[in-house]
Image (cartoon, rainbow, N blue to C red):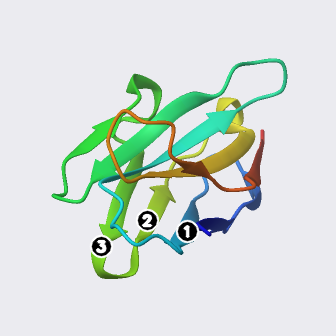
Amino acid sequence: QVQVVESGGGLVQAGGSLRLSCAASGSVFSFSVMGWYRQAPGKQRGLVASITSGGTTSYADSVKGRFTISRDSAKDTVYLQMNNLKSEDTAVYYCNAAVIAGTPGFWGQGTPVTVSS
C-alpha cells in the first residue's frame, strides 16, 4: 500500500523560509513525477512545483524565484524549499507521487503553512 507523508509546515513571518519534506513508499515501481500542490481556504487545489525522476522541474508563476523543489530519487523523497514567503502562500500543502505522469497518483494528508504579515 502506497503511503505519502509530508512534514515541515508551520507558522512563519512574511519574508521567512520553510522547508517541506515528502516521503513516498510502498510502490513496486518508482514514481516518475512527484510534486507539491496547495489549497488555500475557499480556493481550488493547484500545482506549486513538480519534479520528474530525471530532474526536470516545473513551477507555478507565483513561486518562481522563491521556491525550489528537489528530489532524492533513491529514497522517493521530495523537498520544497520556500524562501521569501508571502501571506498569499498561506495554504495546506499536499504532496503527490505518480508512477505514470498524467495519472492521479497518490496524495499525502497535507501540511499547513501559515505566513503572518
> Which is nearer the eye, 46 or 81?
46
Residue type highlighted by circle 1: Ser
Report how many numbered discs are placed on residues in the image.
Answer: 3
Judge from the rendering whether residue 25 lies leftward or rightward of residue 56; answer left or right. right
Residue designated by label 2: 78
In the image, residue 46 sits, relative to residue 28, either above or below, namely above
Residue designated by label 3: 73
In the image, residue 91 sits, relative to residue 6, either above or below, namely above
Judge from the rendering whether residue 58 lies leftward or rightward of residue 112; answer left or right. left
Residue designated by label 1: 21
Where is residue 49 drawn, in percent x and y? 41, 41
Residue type highlighted by circle 3: Ser
Pick whichever of labels 3 and 2 is earlier in the sequence: 3
Determine the CA span between mark 2 and mark 1.
Answer: 6 Å
Pick whichever of labels 2 and 1 is earlier in the sequence: 1
Q: Are marks 2 and 1 in contact (CB under 8 Å)?
A: yes
Where is residue 51 drawn, in percent x and y? 31, 50
